[in-house]
Amino acid sequence: MSDFDVVIVGASVAGCTAARLYAQRGARVALVEKRPAVDAYKTVCTHYIQSSATPTISKLGLVPLLDERGAVRNSIDMWTPYGGWIHARGDTPHGYSVTRRVLDPMLRRMTAETPGVELLCGTTATALAAGSGTGVVVEDRRHGRRELRARLVVAADGRDSHVARMAGVRGRVRRHNRFFYWAYWSGVEPAGDRARMWFMEPDCAYTFPNEDGLCLLLVAPHRSRLPEFRADLEGAYMRTVAALPDAPDLSHATRESKLLGKLDVPNVSRPAARPGLAFAGDAALASDPLWGVGCGWAFQSADWLVEETAEALTGGGDLDAALESYRRTHRRRLGLHHFLIADIATARRANPLERALYRASATDDHVFGAFEAVGTRRRSPATLFTPRMLARLARA
């Protein structure tokens, strides 16, 4: 039996962020990771981190490491049928684009070296601890079992959270009417650090520049096209790319990977906390990856969790009240974003307000500023409904 202040299950973005920030606040942290290698990384990811997460990335001390490794300080241009290209302005706040094969080991090693963190690689959480208090029972690769006792368990183990299943916390699922295929390329034109998005109704596509000259080229067709892709995956992917307005030029590009796919990506949400248990990252809220929110919300939700609960956790305060505060913060900051994202994931057509927003954002700097701040999740979608904004949209 081992005693900690907090046991975190999952040593990816959310888990490592929470572990490092808790330890820096004086907590004793057990970080449980089922994969045995410190250098393990996630492959199903757009690698686009929204600018809303940049303050947390800075707080962690990741910025110099990311810059040294060549991570891209990102921004994005967006094409819609309503006004064409919406170009990012020069003063747009940046996030980061970096592949998970770089980010995950970097963050995990930094966290493991943080005093107060015990990283348990190759260890799986098999049950919640019984009896008084809380904690988890874990099992290593040799089937050795160990009970980790703590005041708080944090589930940071993804949208299909095993901890959530053990705790009986079901997620609310909203279906997704698009599927995804992508590959990594080099030599894609136009070159540069700016990502591009095609929001074509119902199909979508992206180019995401990353470090080392790699560019992730992703298509997100409507589910009605799934038979076409199953019959001729390579041909359907290339036809979709070629049909894009101002399509990326692949004439001198080299594909550096096989085609990767994800056919079912439902939107899943759970209450972010209950007594003795908190959820962070995708375990709390897994929204449509089309909008590049997964990594950013993992950083941010872990940060909010620590801010709301660290004092109670290490000082013997009212942890349940602190967890309830985190739950409310999580819902207030992300709830409306998730609702709108899940609605758009049905692949419906844009409504009149959205069409006006796209048209105005292409030419009106004030509207673009509000649109960009909502799209990068720095502001609530409610800010689009101010009288001044509605007047500008009406003119559009």
Image: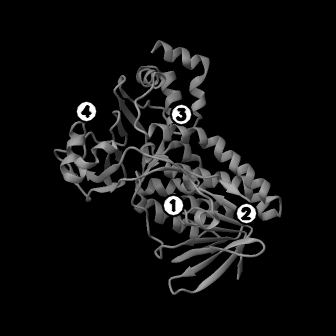
Residue 149 figure quarter: bottom right
**Discs 4, 3 touching: Cβ within 8 Å:** no
Which residue bears the numbered disc 2?
Answer: 276
For badge 1, the amino acid type reads: Asp
Q: Secondary structure at mark 3?
A: helix
Q: Earlier in the sequence, mark 2 or mark 4?
A: 4
Q: Nearer the viewer, residue 159 or 303?
A: 159
Numbered circle sitting on residue 246: 4
Q: Position of residue 255 (x, y in %)?
A: 23, 54
Residue 39 figure quarter: bottom left
Q: CA distance from mark 1 to mark 4?
A: 37 Å
Q: Taking 276 as reference, is 164 left or right?
A: left
Comparing marks 3 and 1, which lies closer to the viewer? 1
Numbered circle sitting on residue 160: 1
Q: Nearer the viewer, residue 6 or 96?
A: 6
Q: Position of residue 345 (x, y in %)?
A: 44, 41
Q: Secondary structure at mark 4?
A: loop
For badge 2, the amino acid type reads: Gly
- Quadrant of the rendering where the N terminus is positioned: bottom right
Q: Earlier in the sequence, mark 3 or mark 2?
A: 2
Q: Position of residue 274 (x, y in %)?
A: 71, 57
Comparing marks 1 and 4, which lies closer to the viewer? 1
For badge 3, the amino acid type reads: Ala
Q: CA distance from mark 4 to mark 3?
A: 25 Å
Q: Earlier in the sequence, mark 3 or mark 1?
A: 1
Which residue bears the numbered disc 3?
Answer: 373
Does residue 187 appear in this view? Answer: no
- Quadrant of the rendering where the C terminus is positioned: top left
